[in-house]
Amino acid sequence: MSGKINKRQLINASPLPKFALMRPVTVLMSLVALLVVGFIAYKQIAVELMPAGYTPPFLGIWTPYPNANPEEVEQYIARPVEEEVRTLQGVQRVVTNSSTRGCWTFIEFSQEIDMDIAYSQLRDRMDRVKAELPDDIERLYLRKWSEDDDPVIWVAIIPDEPLDDPYYFTEQVLKKPLERIEGVANVEIGGADEKSILIHINQDLVKSFKVNLYEIVTALRSDNFSISSGHLESGGQKIYVRSMGKFKSLEAVREIPIHGPNIKVKDIAEVKYDVPERHWKQRIDGQAAIELAIYKESIANTVDVCQAIEEQLADFKKDPRYQNYRIEILFNQGEFILESVNNLENAGIWGAFFAFFVLYFFLRRMRMTIILNIAIPLSIMVSMTVLYFIGWTMNLITMMGLMISVGMVVDNSIVVLENIYHKRANGLNDVDAAAKGSSEVYLAVIMATMTTMVVFLPLILMSDDLEFQFIMLRIGLPVVFALGASLFVALIFIPLAASRIVSRRKVTEAPVIIKLNRVYSKTLAWVLNHRIEAFIILILTYMSMELITDSIPKTDNAQGNINDFRLFLDMPDNYTLDDAENLIIRIEDSIRVKAEAYNVRTINSRFRNNNGRVQVFLFPEPQENWYDVIYKGIAQLGGFYHRSHMPREEVIEDLKKRLPDFPGVKVRTSWRQEGGQDASVNISLYGDDTNKLASLAEEVERRLKKIPDIISIETDRETGEDEIRLVIKREQAQKFGISPRMISGTIMYALRGIQLPKYQTEEKEIDMLIQLREEDRRNFEQLKNITFFSRNGKEVPLAAIADFQIKKGFGEIHREDGKTYLGIKANATTQNVGELYAKVDKVMEDFNMPYGYSWSKGERYRRMQESDDNTMQAVVLAVCFVFILMGILFESFVLPLSVLIAIPFSFVGAYWMLYITNTTLDMMGQIGFIILIGIVVNNAIVLVDLINRLRKEGYSRFDAIVEAGRNRFRPILMTAFTTIGGLIPMAVGNTKMIGISYSPMGRVIIGGLIFSTAISLLAVPWAYTVFDDLRNYFRKLTAGILVKRKITATEETDISFAGK
């Protein structure tokens, strides 16, 4: 322990170490205060799944128009909506999707557009365009994307017996109680339809009364009215007048006169209150099921809301009245949050333990190890405190940033403490060693820290993708705050602790470290004496990366496992709904037979008569610690450990082999990555003629089938149905006084039906639907015999005034920026989307498109290219920022280049790590590469800084390099391995963030650090000598030019004097 501090001892000390040594009590009290405030912030800070505050630049419009022809939807809905949308400011892309259910319009805006204003303007445009749309479109639904758009819980209710009114039961027993929970915004019911008033017209009765169906519907649509009729002024008051004509009872509907007072609705139709005819069914685990999607309020705490919902559902299960109902929670966002937060906390704790172990291994002193490890909780607590006071939440993105910091925050303390001990070893007392040792590396550790901080600037500020900027800000700022705190710990607390707490007992290095240091010193001397040979070795080492780069799988998704797969079924058009259900049951049974081997949790089927989907949810993989993963990996290699169930990819392949062939049925498989994208590639064909596009799609499909990884191909045309197209004989129709409008309207009313004004009760409004009864619209012959009546009452069948064509229609018609396109989707088993697209290019390279037609690899490929460009831009800018900081530190343009050599060699190590561990390079891995740039130069900066200081003290360049390498060998290994240790749980375990694995990021950083540490200890000194020689050469060259100019000027002066 040192005695009283003399101010003269600190006259040359840097400001922060000087303050710490002069004010020890203040420093300790500040340390305690930070820990207390940090702990309070940790307890008080709000927890959520994802950070709020970002609104994606997208808007959507859904225009429902059920049972319509996609071509009609495109012509009468998509095009008018598209033209109106194009008048909005900042629109970059408009995509419409017309189907038998309606029209979906997707609008992408430029990043700078205020989405609240854009939403308001879009609403005004849609109010304007509604007059141009078909009359029976009641409303358009606008959507603005946000995190609150997704349900927090998805529940399935499975009754043992069919319910008479499942919608009413679910609404009264579950929906309303759930909506009363604080924080619940809305509950949507799926799988059950609300009862409506159905008017089923009898075609034979209509014929007997000689009434046109068109006239019946027109009368009913105009009869049930309630409209504003203006206002009156009375006694200075304004009284509004409303004409009321709404139906008050079913009997009132039945008594409506049609075509004169003698014909009423009840004479030609059946009026009843019932569930509308269903064209699809849903089954969960083989039984009819109802789904509930539960949404929370934007300001509500997700975890608290989900727990309250689970309690309400538990009460339902306990109620003896509902023992015959099974409730299955298919998705729970609250559990996701708690599980992911727990995973991150465990990874952080294990990372801190590894850092502690590494430090103790190198230092062999418990007191020193504990002091250095104080930097971890203190830095994390400071970062969390700052996040709390700036109003941020503790979500999975910010927690990932904190976890990345765990192994990095001790680096500065290691460098400072090592230099202090070096000064002690040279004979300085405790205070002088603390002051001088910390001051010598003062600027170097600041700059090294800033290089790590600064790599986040291009990620946050330079990307064109605002969402990417937003996420990187949430990852980067916690890292910046933690590193900033670690810098103050290193420069304030460590000098104080070293002078007053740590004993002067000599530190004994581990024998293995001593031996490695000797080997390193000899190797370094050889490299400096054989620079050409060393250069060849370094080049060959770097070129080894080229051998494996193309073999590393690449994808645009963050890799994870959503634990499901889907089977899509295309069935013959002559299938009935019962036929489809029997087929679905057979497929479900095939899956259920091997439910244990497949690890099946739930089977969710949804189907109609000619297509369907079977979605199989698997039990999630258990969250395993890093040691479990290592043990199982070794056990599998040894052959004494076997999985209890098949991996998902094997499940799909096994099921494809086991499923029997169903005549006329096409089965397609698809499975998703966690980022939300299928394991698939898309191709879009552009052109004016949809039939021509369909024929081109057949050729594209033939080519894609040559790719081995493709397991199924689907096109928009394949999902279409047979259509009966009517060609009206206009002259013939005019003879009978029947207009085309009446013909098309009658067909629509008869087959698809139409909504009438709603039936009003005291409690609610009830939908009213009019349509031909089912037995009058079952086949083609009945369609041809739909009857019209001429002006003179003559009966005219539809076949007399129209021709019929049966053709395969499109399931969907897509348009992008005013151009029609046909989509082709190729599902694959591989995650390597980059390789898939390369194979697509190969099979499509000689595909010649007709004039006016073109093809592209779709929006996903475009975004992949943009992401790669943004990543490359971020890498270049990060390197530039690091170079600028080092130029400031070294006061040189040349010497920073010797430090930058560590970056490319870190990439070599990162790629080899991905290759050896068979890891896919995804978005998380790309972020890891950029973070790596700021980490790997830190040790090189401290090494070059020491070389320069030793040269100033009189060492030769060779001796300065060897001595600096010998002195910095241990701290460089310590800082590298503490960072690696902190990342081991991230890299080795299968822990996930919202299901997304962050192991690619951990493996990239670890591989880069290991390789760059090993190589850079030799490559940086070698590069230092090369660039130092270049600097000296240019100095001599510049000096020679200046001397030559001076001599020339002197000679000219002498000549001028001689002339005089």
Image: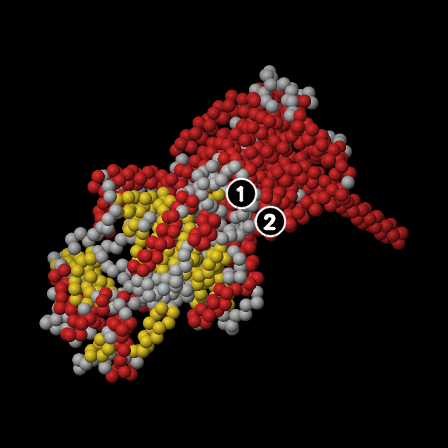
Give percent across and percent down for residue 365.
59, 22
**In this orientation, does residue 204 appear?**
yes
Residue beneath disc 2: 876
Quarter-wise, where is residue 452 in the image?
top right
Camera-nearest residue between 248 and 374: 248
Q: Residue at x 71, y 32 (%)?
A: 519
Camera-nearest residue between 84 and 929: 929
89 on left or right of 235: right
Task: Locate the N terminus and report the quarter of the image it occupies.
Answer: top right
358 on left or right of 745: right
What amino acid does circle 2 point to? Val
Which badge, 1 or 2, comes first in the chain's sequence?
A: 2
What amino acid does circle 1 point to? Met
Report the disc number at residue 1001.
1
Question: Around disc 1, counting alpha carbons within 10 Å, would you say few (fewer than 14), some (14 to 19), or many (20 or more)?
Answer: many
Scheme of colours in the image? secondary structure
Front: mark 1 or 2? 1
Q: Residue at x 12, y 57 (%)?
A: 235
Q: Secondary structure at mark 1?
A: helix
